Image: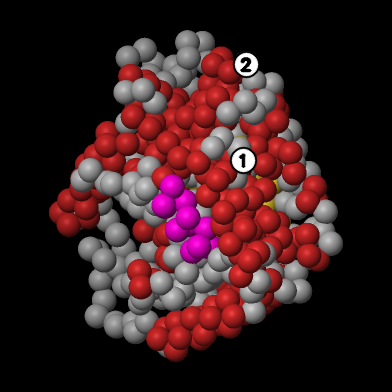
Amino acid sequence: MSRTDGDPFFDALPEGFRAGEDLGAPGDFPFTRGVYRTMYRGRRWTMRQYAGFGTAEETNARYHFLLNRGTTGLSVAFDLPTQMGYDSDAPMAAGEVGRAGVAIDTLADMRALLRGIDLGAVSCSMTINATAPVLLALYTAVADETGVPRDRLRGTVQNDILKEYVARGTYIYPVRPSLRLVSDLMAFCAAELPRWNTISVSGYHIREAGSTAAQEVAFTLANGVEYVRHALARGIELEDFAPRVSFFFAAHNDLLEEVAKFRAARRVWARLMRERFGASDRSCRLRFHTQTGGSTLTAQQPLNNVVRVTVQALAGVLGGTQSLHTNGYDEALALPGAQAAALALRTQQILAEESGVADWADPLGGSFLVEHLTGRIEKEALATMARIEEMGGSSGAIDFMREEIHRAAYRHQLEVEAGTRVVVGVNRYESDDAHEPPSGPDFRELEARQAAALAAFRTGRDVVAVGRGLSAIRQTAAGDDNLLPAMVAAVKDGVTLGEISDTLRAVWGTYDNPR
């Protein structure tokens, strides 16, 4: 097939492009074809299942259920009070305890969450941002108690506060001290937890809020650049933290566009890191986790979601993801049931063991269509990133990014309502079958139990040690030293997540959303 001048299909391809000849090999800069030469022939992607069910004990039971069925990494969903820095008995937590994930207030809760799990053998991903340093402090404290050396701990904290201002909303403090917490965590891990991914720069929530694929790449990588700059400004050596920066993307239904999106993101990041920061190849690799798109799931005909999740998971694998979470088919109705969670995991295992796609690195590389889409997304993303740079970087472009996401989401919704974008079972091929959500826990009873456990924990504390821990956090927050060592010491002395967060609120204030 020869290139045709003037055909827009080929606009994104370089002159003289020869499919399969100009792409380089997987594992070679700029990593368009994957970050490792052998990809899944050398090591499968990590199979994670996101779980958080009210209490730490219930969530721990689900982890053991999944581990016994072959999952290879844990992924923690936290409830809204935990994400926002409130203990479960705080007035602001009323009605939200345990609903969106697990409630973690204390070191006792973290012990229960991880009971019976070898932290030196299993990696753990925690989807947490504003309170990421506190949750990592609790995790580290449990590892210390159980004798697992810190240099053996593997996992990720999301720790991506910029996208909270842009797309999700679980922020607490103003932008500047929030970025200080991000870089404090990065510096702490560089010194103490060298195998831990200190930040997972998240496009997932940007996409779930309504962005396009190209916007997801642009906004995510612009945020990544901002974090690199702040870490360097804090005096952290680039090669001490950059290799542990990871990313988190959504996988939606347009299979080939999603594959191209992942390839374009790798290429853009690699070139940015080399050209702007002089990074080594190791620090130019964009490693990422993928989650199938929660916003694409439908409450109507929920079994259709099995097919959607399979297509999306295939996009992640064909695009070269390093780890993958597959949603349960019933998640548009409620927290996933055990059967749905098991089927979601089996979906990954069938892709890995039966489909053959894991036997090849970048199997779609060289396809004219895939290369066209990769180039198109790269071009659009770079143009958007240039606009963000003109605004002073991501922290100065929050309103711009938020508005662009709203516009894209609005266009998408109009297309669905007009029927020009088909959603099977929603605006085409509908049926009258009703699907009742599965019964969930009694959240009032759960909230009362969590509050009672918290009261008992407080009763057994050394109040002098608690006061000393909070005083150390207050003084450190008012200065420039790293907050993580003070947080680890404080949680070991019985200080709660809410008490740490309230102390920081008193020092720094809170973010006032201008909209």
Decide: is 114 above or below 19: below
Residue drawn at point x = 45 percent, y = 86 percent: 448
| In the image: residue 305, left or right of residue 74 | left
User: Where is residue 184 shown, x and y percent of the image?
Assistant: 59, 40
The span picked out in magenta is 497-507
Q: Is residue 445 found inside the magenta-colored segment of the image?
A: no
Q: Distance of mark 1 from mark 2, alpha carbons?
A: 26 Å
Decide: is 402 above or below 280: below
Residue drawn at point x = 52 percent, y = 26 percent: 229
For this orientation, the residue located farthest to the front is: 464
- Residue picked out by circle 2: 278
User: Where is residue 179 shown, x and y percent of the image?
Assistant: 48, 38
Most foreground residue, 256 or 505: 505
- The quarter of the picture where the C terminus appears is top left
Residue drawn at point x = 52 percent, y = 29 percent: 230
- Tell me where residue 405 sits by quadrant: top left
Decide: few, some or many residues near mark 2? Use Cα within 10 Å; few <14, some 14-19, many ≥20: few
Residue kind at label 2, given as amino acid type: Gly
Query: Is residue 44 among the parts visible in the rendering?
Result: no
Tell which circle, 1 or 2, labels the residue nearer the N-terminal end.
2
| In the image: residue 213, left or right of residue 159 | left
Q: Which mark is residue 382?
A: none
- Tell me where residue 345 sits by quadrant: bottom right
Decide: few, some or many residues near mark 1? Use Cα within 10 Å; few <14, some 14-19, many ≥20: some
Q: Is residue 500 found inside the magenta-colored segment of the image?
A: yes
Helix, strand or loop status at disc 1: loop
User: Where is residue 303 shown, x and y percent of the image?
Assistant: 43, 73
- Residue picked out by circle 1: 482
Decide: is 266 above or below 75: above
User: Where is residue 399 shown, x and y percent of the image?
Assistant: 27, 37
Q: Main secondary structure of the magenta part?
A: helix
Residue kind at label 1, given as amino acid type: Asn
